[in-house]
C-alpha cells in the first residue's frame, strides 16, 4: 500500500523525537499500520539547526504553508506550541482536508471546541494524545478503553516539573525556591516556570480530560488553578506525620450539582499508589462506575515519550482514515451532538476535606475558640496536632484535618479564625482527597 | 441510527455484569457509540436462574445456536469459558459473519491463531480486551496506544488470586496453605485453585500480551510456568530484608536470541510502583523504546470490571464495523501477513538474576565452597546474608542474590551446591528482576 505522507510543523524537541522514532522504528510501525508512515516535509524556524535531521527524502523549509497547503501531505503534525499561529495553521490544514495531529494542550484546551467543529464539518480527524501526560495513552483509555463506564472522577499528577519539585522538597527537606533553582539547572523547569508551578499547564490537561471523561465542551476558563509556590517544608513534613503526601493534583469530578474542575496542591494518603509517583513522572487515576479505579503511569514529557504519543496518533489516523467519518471515534469521546451542558461548579461550591495550619499563642481557650468556629459551620475535625512551642517562640503550630465540607464554609471559618486575637497571621489551607476507589 | 444487536453466550458473573452495565449506562454508552447497544438474546444453561435478568425485550433460551445462527444478532459475546464448546461456537459465529467479543483467555491463548485467521477471512472482528487483566485497557494500550514503540519487555501481576495470597502471606507472616484457605472462604480462590496458583491463568494472559507486543503468533505451549505453592514465609521475609517483594509475575522480553515467555514468583525492588500493587489488584508494566516504562493498574477480575472491558469492545466494534476491514486495528496489533517467527527461548536460555537460599552446616569452608562453584560458572554475587543459627539447629540459612546469568548456569550451580556434604537439602531458587525503566 502507498505510504502515508506526514508534514511536521516544528522540528524542536518533540518534532525531532517524532522524526527519530519514525525512522528508527519504521519497519515495526509499518507492520502495525499496514503501510509506511513517512515524514516528507518539515517546517522549521532555523534551517541551519534543522540540517542534522536531513536525509531520507525529507524536505525542510521555513514557510508553514509549504506543509499546510501541500497536496502531497496527508497528515499535518502541529508541534510549534502556543496559540498563534498554531490555531490558524491547524484550521487551514483542516480546511485543506488534511488530518491533524497535535501535542498542543493550550490550543486544544482553549480552542478545541472550534477546531473539532471545523474538523467534523470537513470530515477529518484531529488527534491529540500527546497533549496530555506525554507518552501515557490516557486519551485513548478515556475515549475508548473505558466507554462502558459512567466516569465519576479523574485525578492526575500531570505536571512533571511540579512533581519533581515536590518530591525533592520532601526528600531533602528543602524549600521551594532552592528546589526550583535546582530544577532549572537540570532542565526540568523553564527559566519562566509560571505555567508549570502555577498549575496552568496542569489545568490545560485537566480541561481536556474532563471534556472527554464527562462529554462536555472544553471549558478552560472555568478551571480553578492554585500553584505550589506557597507550600512550605513544614506543611510537607506535617502532612507526612499524618500519613499523607502533598501532590499537585488536577481533579475533575461529576457531582449532582455540576462538575468540579480544579488544580491545586492536595494531601493524599501516603499508601495510595499515586502518592508514590515521584520525580518527573506522571500518573492519572480514573474512577469509573463499572471498572472502579484504574491508574495510568509513565513519562509525562520528554522528546521520545511525547513522540510516542504523536506517532501512535499517526498510526490511529492511518488505520482510520478510510473509515466512514460518522463511525470514527468522536474527538471528545461522545458524539458531537450528544455533549452535555452540565455546569462547571465555582470553587466555593466544591466539596473536599482540608488540612489547616495556624499559629496560635500558647494559652488556654485557643483551641476551644477554633473548634467552636468549625462546629458552628458544621465542619467536623478528623485529626488535630498541636506542636510543642519552639525555643524562643510564643506561638505553637496547630494542624487540623477536617472531614469533607463545602469550600465556602471553610473560607468563612478561616476568616473567623484569622480574626481571633489568639491566632497570629494567616491560616494555611491545603485541600485533602482520600481518592478512595469505592 | 439503528441499534446494534448483541447476543450473549452465558449470563453468569461476567455476562450478568455486562447486561447490568449496558442497561445502567445505556444513555451514556449510546452518546459515545453513536447508537444504542442492545442485548437482544442471551443463552444460558439454567433458564430458571436467568429469570432475574428478564425484561427490556431480552429473549433468554438455552440453545447457543439461537444466538450464533440468529440473523438479528450483529455481535456475539462469548462468556461461557473453557475450550469446548466455546471454540466451536466462536468459529460458527464468525462463519455466520458476526463480530465476536470474548473474555476467554484460554481460548485466545490456545486457539487465537486459528480464530483470528477465520475472522480475517470472513472480514469480521474478534475483540478480547476482557481476556487480560479484567477492566484495565491493556490490550488497547499495547495494540494502539504504544504503536510507535519497539516493545522491549512486559511484566505483569495478572492473577489476582495469587497476588492476594502473596500479599496476605507478607502482611500476616502466614503460610501458603493457611492463606489459600482464607482466599477460598472469601471467594478470591476457587475450590480447585490450580489454574491460579500454578501460573496457568497468568500464562494464558501473558501469551496474549506477548503476541500483541512483539507481533508473533500465540504460543501458549512454549510458555514456562511456575506457581507460588512452594514459597515459604521465610523467603518472603528474607526478600523484604534485602529490599525486595515477591510477586507472581508474567514476563515476556525480546532478546537478541528470541523471546522470553515465563510466569514465576519473582523478587522485585520494593520501591518500584508495581511492587506496591497489593491484594487482588492487577498491574502491567510495559517497556517501550520510545516511551520508556508505562504502568497500567486496576481490578483484574470481578463482574463489573470485566464487563467494563466487554462493553468497551462492543463500543469499539460498533464504531468500527462499517470500516473497511483492511484498515481496522489488526487482531494481533501487527498486520496478519507481518507476524514474526522469532523463536520463544527455552527456559535454560533465559537470562535473569536469582535469589538462592540454602541450609548449611555452620562450619568453616562452606561459603568458600559455594562461592567457588558460582565463580566457576561465571556467576557473580550481588548480596549475601548468613543468618544466626536457630537455638537447637546445627544449620544456618544462607541467602544470596546473584547478578544476571543464564538459567542453565544457575541450574548447574545448584546441582553442584546440593552435592556438597556441608549443605543440607535442596537449594531454594527464586528469580529476581530489577525492572529498570532504562
Image (cartoon, coloured by chain):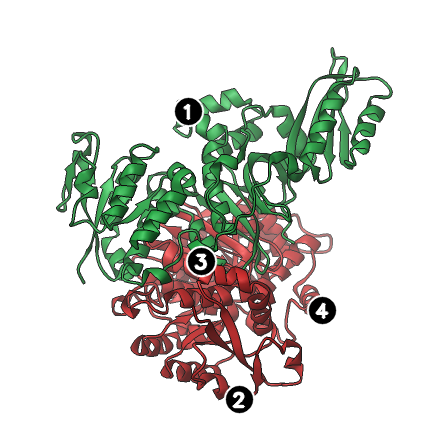
Chain colours: A red, B green
A257 up-or-down from A117: above or below: above
Do the dots labelled 4 and 1 sit on one chain? Answer: no
User: Circle 3 is placed at which residue position?
Assistant: B144
Q: Nearer the viewer, residue A112 or A354?
A: A112
User: Circle 1 is placed at which residue position?
Assistant: B184
Q: A321 left or right of B45? A: right
Disc 4/disc 3 C-alpha distance (Å):
36 Å
B352 up-or-down from A424: above or below: above
B293 up-or-down from B364: above or below: below
Disc 1/disc 2 C-alpha distance (Å):
68 Å
Residue at image location 44% in from the left, 69% down from the top: A128
Where is the N terminus of chain A found, in terms of image quarters? bottom left
Residue at image location 45% in from the left, 21% down from the top: B181
SS type, badge 3: helix
User: Circle 2 is placed at which residue position?
Assistant: A63
Disc 3/disc 1 C-alpha distance (Å):
37 Å
How crowded pointer 2 is (Cα within 10 Å; few <14, some 14-19, many 20+) is rated as: few
Chain ID at mark 2: A
Amino acid at each position: 500500500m502507498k505510504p502515508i505522507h506526514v508534514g511536521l510543523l516544528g522540528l524542536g524537541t518533540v518534532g525531532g523525537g517524532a522524526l527519530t522514532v519514525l525512522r528508527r522504528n519504521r519497519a515495526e510501525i509499518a507492520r502495525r499500520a499496514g503501510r509506511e508512515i513517512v515524514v516528507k516535509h518539515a517546517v522549521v524556524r532555523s534551517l541551519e539547526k534543522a540540517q542534522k535531521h536531513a536525509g531520507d527524502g525529507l524536505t525542510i523549509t521555513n514557510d508553514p504553508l509549504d506543509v499546510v497547503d501541500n497536496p502531497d501531505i496527508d497528515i499535518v503534525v502541529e508541534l510549534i506550541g502556543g496559540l498563534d499561529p498554531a490555531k490558524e495553521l491547524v484550521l487551514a490544514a483542516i480546511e485543506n482536508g488534511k488530518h491533524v495531529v497535535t501535542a498542543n494542550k493550550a490550543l486544544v484546551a482553549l480552542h478545541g471546541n472550534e477546531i473539532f467543529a471545523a474538523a467534523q464539518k470537513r470530515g477529518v480527524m484531529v488527534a491529540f494524545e500527546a497533549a496530555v501526560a506525554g507518552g501515557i495513552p490516557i486519551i485513548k483509555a478515556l475515549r475508548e478503553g473505558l466507554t462502558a463506564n459512567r466516569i465519576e472522577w479523574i485525578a492526575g499528577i500531570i505536571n512533571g516539573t511540579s512533581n519533581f519539585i515536590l518530591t525533592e522538597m520532601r526528600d531533602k527537606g528543602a524549600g521551594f525556591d532552592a528546589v526550583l533553582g535546582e530544577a532549572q539547572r537540570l532542565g526540568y523547569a523553564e527559566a519562566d516556570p509560571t505555567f508549570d508551578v502555577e498549575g496552568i499547564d496542569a489545568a490545560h490537561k485537566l480541561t481536556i480530560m474532563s471534556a472527554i471523561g464527562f462529554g462536555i465542551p472544553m471549558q478552560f476558563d472555568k478551571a480553578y488553578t492554585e500553584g505550589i509556590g506557597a507550600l512550605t517544608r513544614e506543611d510537607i513534613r506535617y502532612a507526612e506525620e499524618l500519613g499523607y503526601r502533598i501532590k499537585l493534583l488536577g481533579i475533575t469530578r461529576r457531582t449532582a450539582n455540576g462538575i468540579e474542575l480544579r488544580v491545586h496542591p492536595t494531601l493524599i494518603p501516603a499508601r495510595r499508589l499515586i502518592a508514590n509517583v515521584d520525580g518527573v513522572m506522571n500518573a492519572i487515576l480514573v474512577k469509573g462506575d463499572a471498572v472502579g479505579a484504574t491508574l495510568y503511569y509513565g513519562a509525562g514529557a520528554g522528546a521520545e515519550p511525547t513522540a510516542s504519543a504523536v506517532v501512535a496518533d499517526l498510526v490511529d489516523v492511518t488505520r482510520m482514515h478510510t473509515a466512514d467519518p460518522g463511525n470514527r471515534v468522536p474527538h471528545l469521546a461522545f458524539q458531537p451532538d450528544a455533549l452535555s451542558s452540565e455546569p462547571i461548579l465555582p470553587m466555593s461550591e466544591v466539596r473536599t476535606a482540608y488540612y489547616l495550619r495556624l499559629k496560635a499563642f500558647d494559652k488556654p481557650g485557643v483551641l476551644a475558640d477554633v473548634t467552636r468556629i468549625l462546629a458552628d459551620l458544621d465542619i467536623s475535625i478528623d485529626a488535630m496536632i498541636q506542636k510543642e512551642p519552639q525555643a524562643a517562640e510564643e506561638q505553637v503550630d496547630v494542624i487540623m484535618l477536617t472531614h469533607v465540607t463545602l469550600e465556602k464554609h471553610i473560607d468563612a471559618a478561616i476568616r473567623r479564625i484569622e480574626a481571633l486575637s489568639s491566632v497570629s497571621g494567616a491560616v494555611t489551607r491545603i485541600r485533602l482527597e482520600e481518592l478512595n476507589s469505592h
